[in-house]
Image (cartoon, helix red, strand yellow):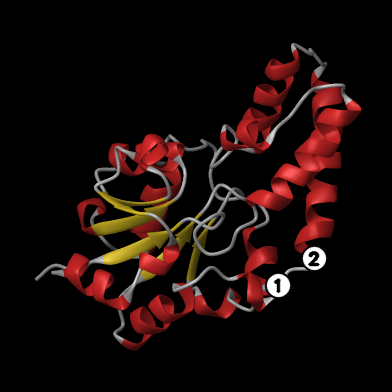
Amino acid sequence: MEAKGFIFDLDGVIVDTAKYHYLAWKELANQLGINFTEEHNELLKGVSRVKSLDILLGLGNVSLTEEEKNKYMEQKNTRYLTYVAQMNESEILPGIKDVLTYLNENKIPYSLGSASKNARVILKGVHLLDAFTEIVDGNDVSKAKPDPEVFLIAAEKLRLKPQNCFVIEDAEAGIEAAKRAKMISVGIGEEKMLGKADFLLSSTSELSIDFVKKLMK
């Protein structure tokens, strides 16, 4: 039987950093006089920083020079990192530690596949950096999801065929990227956003060891 493995997104799957992204983008939006709600924040899930700023500016019909954009992105990230610096193990989402322990014990390969350039900082803060032997994040890719690049690199690092990889994602762009990579997708969240996923779970607490065993079969 061919080897199978898992690729985990970070934000909304391992930890919930969406709330911190929201607070940091909200502060920037207020500064620029843009109305930015939690609903708007859903549009930024799984999307690169550059694209996120473009979406934000589009909401307020604001145009900036490249220099200004870079300044504001840096400012947003600095603010975000002050929130992230306070994270600890209590922020790991339900069920995740058990699943990672099971994968480790059974020598089932897995990797991180995240758009975040801060992935290692976050994993270190919640004491999961050592749990991942393979990490592919925003520093390793040139194309953002829904481009499949991040997942294809992860599969390569795991020495697995794409069709033998299960992608755990909470963002529409991530599910689309998994589809383009010809991987099996497991969506964590609501059907209206993630209806295209091969499997759909309402939260990570449903990502049980039993569920993982079923997938492997």
Residue found at the far bottom of this picture: 105
Is 184 left or right of 178, judged from the image as shown? left
Q: Which mark is residue 125?
A: 1
Query: Residue 30: where, in percent of width, then height?
Result: 86, 30
Kind of residue indicated by mark 1: Gly
Residue at the spot 46% in from the left edge and 72% down from the top edge: 96
Asked whether 166 or 206 is in front, the reply is 206
Query: Residue 197: where, in percent of width, then height?
Result: 30, 44
For numbered disc 1, what is the local secondary structure?
Answer: helix
Is 18 left or right of 111, judged from the image as shown? right
In the rendered image of this protein, does residue 32 appear above or below residue 15? above
Query: Residue 183: where, in percent of width, then height?
Result: 26, 49
For numbered disc 2, what is the local secondary structure?
Answer: loop
Marks 1 & 2, CB-CB < 8 Å contact: yes
Query: Residue 199: where, in percent of width, then height?
Result: 26, 52
Task: Choose the circle earlier in sequence order: 1 or 2.
Answer: 2
Is 76 left or right of 195, judged from the image as shown? right
| Mark 1 surroundings: few (<14), some (14-19) or many (≥20) residues within 10 A | some
